[in-house]
Image (cartoon, rainbow, N blue to C red):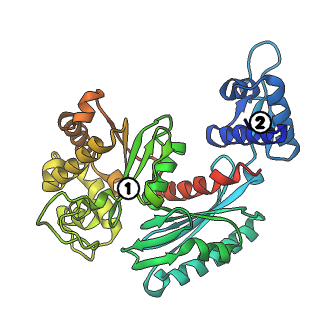
Amino acid sequence: MTVARPDEVRRYNRAALLRLLHKGGPTTRAALSTELGLNRSTIKMLVDGLAGDGVVEERVPRLAQGAGRPSLLVLPQAQAVVVLAVDVQVEHAGIALVGLGGEILGRNSWNLRGRQREPEEVVCHVAESAALLAQDLGLRPVAAGVSVPGIVRRSDGMVHGAANLGWLDVPLGERMGTALGVPVVVGNDAELGALAEFVRGVGRGASDAVFVSADVGVGGGIIAQGALLRGSAGYLGEIGHMTVRPGGRRCHCGNVGCWETEVGEAALRRALGLGEGRPRGAIVAELHELQRDPDPVARLGDYVDWLILGLVNVVNVFGPELVVLGDLFTALPTPVVDRARAEVRARSMVSRAQGGVRIEKSTLGPDLKLLGAAEAAFDSVLTRV
């Protein structure tokens, strides 16, 4: 039987307390004691230590009322621990410095065209932009998280394939780590989107959820029993490539009839009657205009049927309590999402068995992947603060 040393126990408790503050925000010592199952003297020692290191601050609540001394709030200090978040998409890339508690302290973004989309150019631009941003803000990131629309090996950040970027077997984790000089975690964009929703978005409090995003392609991230489901070597969530229409359109992955060929960006453009050259903004604008249409479900036609078919399959396979729709799906008219909710409940055995599955749109907007990348970086950092 191995007995943990007192210093190991203290480090573990310190990391647990800090993670609670990072994800849950300001709270009292009493609440921390209850949540962590530690006595008040232990909480006092931990908070005092973190305050002495400048990682947290205690403050009287602004709206404190009633007689007696109010309980002090313990607040994480955003600039005490900072990570770099990187979001590489098909048409643009962005970075942000994110502080403890999930606060975005500064950001930058740029378009990706031609050679700028090549891995070496992306890494170089990220490193240069991050250095300038850190210098401007007077901050130094201690780790980095990178979101990529592709199949990523979690152990070392090898991008096995990112077809829409034209990448194949790119050692992105190694290259980013060398360029940035800090530990780097690389993840699939939908996986990190799921993480962001679970920690910061509509998925907070859900123990089993699926994040489904539509960009150029369609991807998914799965939260199972409160943790990311990663699969073998980290390869999981390619739900856009489940076959839904044998004999359908050929997909860039080499398969035929993938779900993303029926509900991805190109399919949505076809359903709206927009030409292939129309930009992403035109799709979003048309969907917003469709909100005023008396029957947007009919206007989108078969697109809605394929969307529902895929969602029914996802719910039957993973059995989530919540499905979060991200990226282009967030612009879908309310009646379309309402129809999807009703059909999934009626046609999914799992949904019927558990009394329904919530289907909600993401509320994190364009910061979604940045926040997810930041959380991936924080995951290992908080054990060392």
Residue farthest to the front, as pictured = 1
Q: Is residue 169 visible?
A: yes
With respect to residue 232, does 210 lie above or below? above
Q: Which residue is mark 1?
A: 237
Q: Nearer the viewer, residue 13 or 203?
A: 13
Q: Which residue is mark 2?
A: 3
From the viewer's perspective, is 193 left or right of 60?
left
With respect to residue 210, does 238 lie above or below? below
- Count residues near mark 2 (Cα–Cα under 10 Å), then give few for <14, some for 14-19, many for 20+: few
Residue 290 horizontal/vertical position (percent): 23, 53
Q: Quick one: label 1 or label 2, which is nearer the N terminus?
A: 2
Residue 75 horizontal/vertical position (percent): 74, 38
- Count residues near mark 1 (Cα–Cα under 10 Å), then give few for <14, some for 14-19, many for 20+: many
Residue 347 horizontal/vertical position (percent): 18, 37
Residue 10 horizontal/vertical position (percent): 80, 38
| Circle 2 SS class | loop
With respect to residue 339, does 280 lie above or below? below
Residue at the image point whose x is 84% and y is 47% from the top: 54
